[in-house]
Every structure is written in C-alpha cells, then in structure tokens.
Amino acid sequence: MERKSAKRRPSDRRTFRKDGDNSFGGRGGDGTRRSPRPPRMSIPKGTEINYKNIAFLQKCLTERGKLLSHRLTGANAAQQRQIGVAVKIARFLGLLPVGSSRRK
C-alpha cells in the first residue's frame, strides 16, 4: 500500500490572534507600520551604572524585583548587562531586596 504524507509548506503554518486578525511583522490591520513604543525611562548620559546607585537600579526593576527589558529602560545591550551585574551585587550586599514577599 502506498501512503501519501501530507507535508505542510511554511505558508500553511500561520498563527492567528484571538481576535481573528492575522497581520504579521509588526503591521497594523491595514498594513501600515506601527511606530515603536517610547521607552518608559532613558538613561542619562553621565549616569554611572554600579551597585551603589540604588535609586537608579530601583527604576530598572519591577515591583516584583524583576529586571525591566531593554525596550522599556532604553538601555543598549552593554548597559543592560551592566544593570544586571549591578543588581546582582546590590542584592548580594543587601542593598536591594531579592524579590517581593507579596504573592498574587
């Protein structure tokens, strides 16, 4: 017996959102490009990213103690790594809380 295998092409694998819209690639429903979301905060030019600057590090964390992404902080890749290292040191020294005690 001959068995035919139904192979899918990449164009067949489309994902749909819950509302039924199948727009791709950051485009709106009408095909226009959306403007990028502005960052919540920006890192001033002279700001030194180290574990002693607690006020700045707290702005880079959520209420639960998680790091904000670079899209929300406006940091580039090198600055984001420096923020992560500084937060880790500050947590180790007890300057920042490790996490939130409040649970959902």
Image (tube, grey):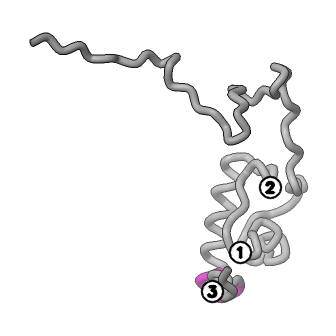
SS at badge 3: helix
Does label 3 or label 2 sit earlier along the sequence? 2
Most foreground residue, 101 or 98: 101
Mark 2, residue position: 73
Mark 1, residue position: 51
Answer yes or no: do the residues labelled 1 and 2 have beta carbons within 8 Å?
no
Residue located at (64% from left, 64% from top):
84
In the rendering, at what x and y percent does residue 70 appear?
A: 73, 51
In the rendering, at what x and y percent does residue 16 appear?
A: 63, 33
Task: Identify residue type, mark 3.
Answer: Leu
Does label 1 or label 2 sit earlier along the sequence? 1
Query: Around disc 1, counting alpha carbons within 10 Å, would you say few (fewer than 14), some (14 to 19), or many (20 or more)?
Result: many
**Which corner quadrant of the image does residue 61 belong to?**
bottom right
The answer for how far apart the CA atoms under marks 3 and 2 are is 24 Å
SS at badge 2: helix
Verify whether residue 3 appears in magenta.
no
- Residue 102 is left or right of residue 27, and the answer is left
Task: Identify residue type, mark 2.
Answer: Thr
Residue located at (68% from left, 83% from top):
100
Q: Which residues are magenta?
A: 91-95
Question: Any mark on residue 93, and which?
Answer: 3
Residue located at (81% from left, 50% from top):
74
The answer for how far apart the CA atoms under marks 1 and 3 are is 9 Å
Most foreground residue, 80 or 22: 22
Residue located at (71% from left, 86% from top):
95
SS at badge 1: loop
Question: Any mark on residue 89, and which?
Answer: none
Against 57, residue 31 (above or below) is: above
User: Depth-wise, is mark 1 or mark 2 nearer the camera?
Assistant: 2
